Amino acid sequence: MRKPLVAGNWKMNGSLESVRELLEGLKSGIDAVSNAEVAVCPPYVFVPEVQKLLDGSAISWGGQDLSVEVSGAYTGEIAASMLSDFGCKYVIVGHSERRSYHGESDELVAKKFAAARAGGLVPILCVGETLEEREQGITEDVCARQLDAVIDLVGVDGLACGVIAYEPVWAIGTGKTATPEQAQDVHAFIRGRIAEKSAEVAEGMRILYGGSMKPGNAKELIGKPDIDGGLIGGASLVAEDFLGICTAAN
Ligand code: 13P
């Protein structure tokens, strides 16, 4: 049985004050959520404050990205060990915003996955197609390519330490959610692709959905057999909405 995971990707949002307020709201409402794992991924600078406020709570935290390097002259980069130092459990790799705005290739994302794993973090690997790719009918090809790059580098057993997030790019921040059936189809495809290498890894792998997930659609999405939780953007910035999604996953 896969334990659902609901992870908030705060992206580049928040202030020290709003972070404190949001976390107080989450902590006071989280007790009701016992069967789902919950995590937040703040911008790097807020990680120490998040650690201070969430230490000992039921909520984990993580980074939104990391360097492939261990240390050295890489201005602006953050290493896996630094995230670990501040108690991070997770780190997102290959978010579509990193792939498109920062030109991250499948190969680089695979190296980030490996760096996270080597540093003892749980990578959340994002995959997903653009609207153009969906309209061309190559959704599965795109997801397979993004997934295979990681499997080629770390092997299917290496993949097993992580979590996958299927995030159709056209559904991110647009209010257009994939229908539960559309999402389920791709999730089942991804699980099947992993099963070609290892049925056991495929069975245990958590595959989250991301893209305009809200309290109102979360239950139907997470209710699908291959959807094991959510990676939440906008709705993770509002305590009530994020808790609503956590409750749906519960
Ligand atoms: P939204 O929930 O704002 O659509 O963002 C999804 C996302 O990109 C999470 O990583």
Image (cartoon, helix red, strand yellow):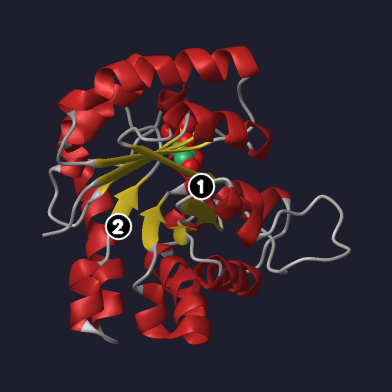
Local packing at callout 2 (Cα closer than 10 Å; few below 14, some 14-19, many 20+) is: many
Q: What residue sits 68% from the left and 34% below the top?
A: 45
Q: Which residue is mark 1?
A: 87
Amino acid type of disc 2?
Answer: Ile
Give the Cα distance between marks 1 and 2. 23 Å
User: Residue 159: where, in percent of width, then height?
Assistant: 39, 74
Q: Which part of the image, by quadrant, shows the N terminus?
A: bottom left
Residue, x 22% and y 48% (percent of image)? 4
Q: Which mark is residue 207?
A: 2
Q: Is residue 145 left or right of residue 81?
A: left
Question: Compared with residue 80, is residue 250 higher up or lower down, i.e. above or below?
Answer: above
Quadrant position of the C terminus in the picture: top left
**Count the marks: how many?**
2
In the picture, the disc for residue 105 is none
Q: In the structure shown, which secondary structural element does the residue marked by tag 2 occupy? A: strand
Mark 1 Cα-neighbour bin, 10 Å: few <14, some 14–19, many ≥20: many
Given residues 226 and 123, the one toward you in this image is 123
